[in-house]
Amino acid sequence: MGQVASIILAAGKGTRMKSRLPKVLHGVCGKPMLTHVIQAACDSGVDRNIVIIGHEADLVRDKAGSNIEWVNQSEQLGTGHAVMQAEPLLSGFEGSILILCGDTPLITSNTLKELMLTHTAAGNSVTVLTALMDDPTGYGRLVRDAAGEVKEIVEHKDASPQQLEIYEINTGIYCFDGPKLFAALKVISPANAQGEYYLTDVLAVLKNNGERIGAVKVADPSETMGINNRVQLAEADKIMRQSILHRLMMDGVTIIDPQNTYIDRDIVFGPDSVVYPGTVIEGYCRFGGNCRIGPYSHLKDVETGDDVTVQNSVVMESTVGNNVTIGPFAYIRPGTVLGDDVKVGDFVEIKKSVIGNGSKVPHLSYVGDAQIGKKVNVGAGTITCNYDGSQKWQTIIGDNSFIGSNTNLVAPVEVGQNAIIGAGSTITKNVPDGALCVERSKQAIYPGWVARKNKKK
Ligand code: UD1
Ligand code: CA
């Protein structure tokens, strides 16, 4: 259908959100709603995205995403006025224009494709996406003539009592012939109940010019739900979440309890993985096959290999190899790399550290700013003392070394390969390869001492 540009309306404040954050930046399944709309436009094959911003324009520009052309609408004088602001950017543009709203995050690329296909096939000057609503209150109504042809859109506040009985509403999404849209926008006026330049008035202008105008009814009206308040935000979040989980299940992931599992949109699992209840997976995550995630775990920006188990744990911005077990009750902080066959057990915190293949940190340890080689055993209660009160320092442990329980490794410090540290040691000097190092006072034994003490009493 030639070139397509989208114009996404996002200049409004969103007063009913009662928020300092502009409405279109409120998140649905982990991403700003505007970002979902832009994504749907891109996936439907749009060549350029133009976003109209006004309220908190700089913040929206920062957070919404990339590959976007921005246009400022300094005064919000209506949806028609908003679209007019894009005209200079589109001078000489002969293609189609898809109009979208920044507050309809559930719209899908399939619906947009269908709208554009119908538009082109019918040779329309405009095709509007409509929906049948049980409760059409507040929406513009689609008025058809006796033959069923689209005649005009009348806003709720301007509608007659008969028109208020119409259940087919304007979703605010349209496909226009570009040059005809901008020509018709020159004719509309703000002589209406809200004193605004209504984009919807363009339909009647085109109709009066003898142009073909048409409509496509959306199959699932919830897709076009506009978010105005936080109740609707939660509803949209729930709808999108269920569709994400549905897709994952159809792709071979077991979700034990879909009502209690929260997974963002761009997350990918290998086959036969299982997600247990109470699990939140956010951002950009990639899981291999046969992973077991949860219950009650929180992961963000994590990449794993196959056969990884994460139980009742938090894992942030980290990379995990194959056949790794984490938890229960572990906290893996950003910048951590766990190799293959690693075990991180209960009540262990790991921060910005590399742990080599086959190494184990099974219980009650803090490992920060460390590089641990292969097949190292870090005994229970071992602590890397990485902070001297002003600076962070590194701990290095070579392959096959054994760190006895309750060891303090006072960084910067290095333990060589095949070394053994006796339990309870506080290590402040480097330990060479193959050495045994014990740092603890000698054990004293006083035979019969208890009986003598009791006699004195
Ligand atoms: C609009 C439609 C209505 C439709 C409804 C669907 C018009 C006149 N009415 O009404 O027929 O049923 O959407 O949700 O178009 N915006 C700007 N600049 C402005 C005004 C609005 O960028 O000057 C943006 C808003 O931020 C919002 C979108 O345009 O994202 C829609 O504006 P809004 O005021 O919510 O229109 P509605 O009254 O809902
Ligand atoms: Ca609205």
Image (cartoon, rainbow, N blue to C red):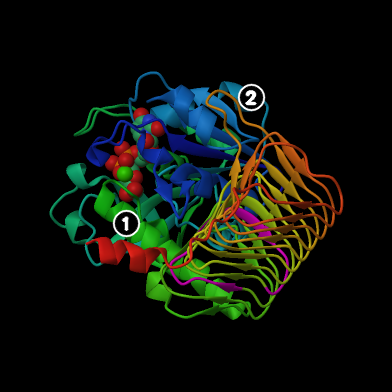
Callout 2: SS? loop
Percent across and percent down for residue 271 are 68, 78
Taking the spot 16% from the left edge, 57% from the top edge, the residue there is: 162
Kindly tell me whether residue 405 is visible in this rendering: yes
Mark 2 vs mark 1: in front: 1
Range of residues picked out in magenta: 292-307
Whole-number angstrom distance, CA of label 2 to CA of label 1: 40 Å
Judged from the image, the quadrant occupied by ligand 1 is top left
Asked if residue 360 lies left or right of residue 133, the reply is right
Callout 1: SS? helix
Q: Badges 2 and 1: C-beta atoms under 8 Å apart? A: no
* Residue under pointer 2: 91
Mark positioned earlier in the residue sequence (2 or 1):
2
* Residue under pointer 1: 234
- Please identify the quarter of the rendering in which residue 457 is found: bottom left
- Please identify the quarter of the rendering in which residue 444 is found: bottom right
Kindly tell me whether residue 143 is visible in this rendering: no
In the displayed structure, 20 sits above or below 320; it is above
Considering depth in this image, is 60 or 426 the residue closer to the camera? Answer: 426
